[in-house]
Amino acid sequence: MNEKKWSWELGRIAGIDVKIHLTFFFLLLWIGLSGLISSGSFLGLVNEVLFVIALFVLVVLHELGHALAARRFGISTKDITLLPIGGVARLERMPEDPREEMIVAGAGPLVNVVIGAVMFLALLLMGAFNQPLTAELLQTNFWVRLLSVNVSLAIFNLIPAFPMDGGRVLRAILATRMDYVKATRTAANIGRGLAVLMGIVGFFVNPWLILIALFVWSGAGSEAQSVELKAGLQGLAVRDGMVSQFYQVEANQALESVLQLSMATGQGHLPVVSNGRFLGFIRRGDLLNAMQRLGRRAPAYAAIGSEPVGIDPDMPLYEVLPKLTVNRVLPVIEQGQLIGLVTSDSVQQRMWLNQKLKGERTAPPNEKRDIV
């Protein structure tokens, strides 16, 4: 799913775009109907919808805390998007300095703590706590309920497990005593241990804990894998991991000859160029559709179905990884000319070779090696 296509911009806060995803409206609809059914009145529907909106204002402020803390260290935030499961601040990158990461990760929960303190004092002065704090009060008093959820949000995010903020704080603490990759692996293992405990407790107490446990287990594995992959690509540029020998077609070349080339070579993405300048990719499906619509003699450029932005050959190779989640093949452009292609396979192979070479360089002098 194209996130840009399914998200709408609400506005800008501190120069950061705040967006809302289509699925968020389904959450509002579901919550509203639940309020209508449980209360039997339109007022109940409005109250529940307003509560969810207020909750997600807290979520935006939480994510804004991360974004502003990251900005302090020269890290920009692409946007903040509201999803049914919460908010996501897309930072340009996460700081690897332990102190900086601790500040950025802890800034979100700190915002909730400050908001919670202000809300508590306001409710205290208004006399909201003059009566016993019962479950009924938590459900019927809008602001007391919002305070309790805000506290829960802060506590949940401080669980020392990825992808929560607490997992990043834990990693930052560990990274002051060991290398970053080992710290990530250790924090991920701790997170997985907590996930197992949550799953066991959830089996007997609350099934929702089982879902959270699966979320934590998956997040821990993803973070560890991502960091190890980045470490394996450290010091490598895009030109080190690109495929430099590939087939391409000219913009005015007939689709019939493009099909023959595709069948003969098995290359799934054929770059289309005009005087060496990259125009886009023709994928197998795009080619067949264009031939059905336009005929065999139509020009190749009419079948272009993907136009990813070219990447610089001197860009750090690990920065390409997020882009490969959107486009399976990326063009490498130098001085306006297409010089190579980057794929997940080419990156993985280069990483494997890099690790192999590092292992050989660090091998003991007397170690026996096979001669190939």
Image: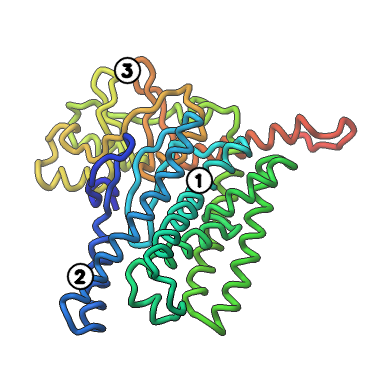
Depth check: 229 or 193 in front?
A: 193
Residue 34 figure quarter: bottom left
Name the amino acid, label 2.
Answer: Val
| C-alpha distance separating marks 3 and 2 | 56 Å
Q: Is residue 20 above or below residue 97?
A: below
Q: Position of residue 79 (x, y in %)?
A: 34, 42
Q: Quadrant of residue 25?
A: bottom left
Amino acid identity at mark 3: Gly
Residue position marked by numbered label 2 in the rendering: 46
Residue that numbered label 3 is attached to: 336
At a point 42% along the width and 50% down the height, the residue shown is 62
* Three-letter residue code for mark 1: Ala
Left or right of residue 270: residue 62: right
Quarter containing the C terminus? top right
Graded by Cα atoms within 10 Å as few (under 14), some (14 to 19) or many (20 or more), the crowding at tag 1 reads: many
Residue at 23% over, 47% down? 10
Mark 2 is surrounded, within 10 Å at the Cα level, by few (under 14), some (14 to 19) or many (20 or more) other residues, namely: some
Please say if 260 is above or below 331.
Answer: below
Front tag of 1 and 3: 1
Distance of mark 1 from mark 2, alpha carbons?
Answer: 32 Å
In the image, farthest residue toward the left: 294
Residue at disc 2, secondary structure: helix
* Front one among 360 and 189: 189
Q: Which residue is labeled 1 in the image?
A: 107
Q: Position of residue 89 (x, y in %)?
A: 40, 46
Residue at 33%, 57% in the rendered image: 56
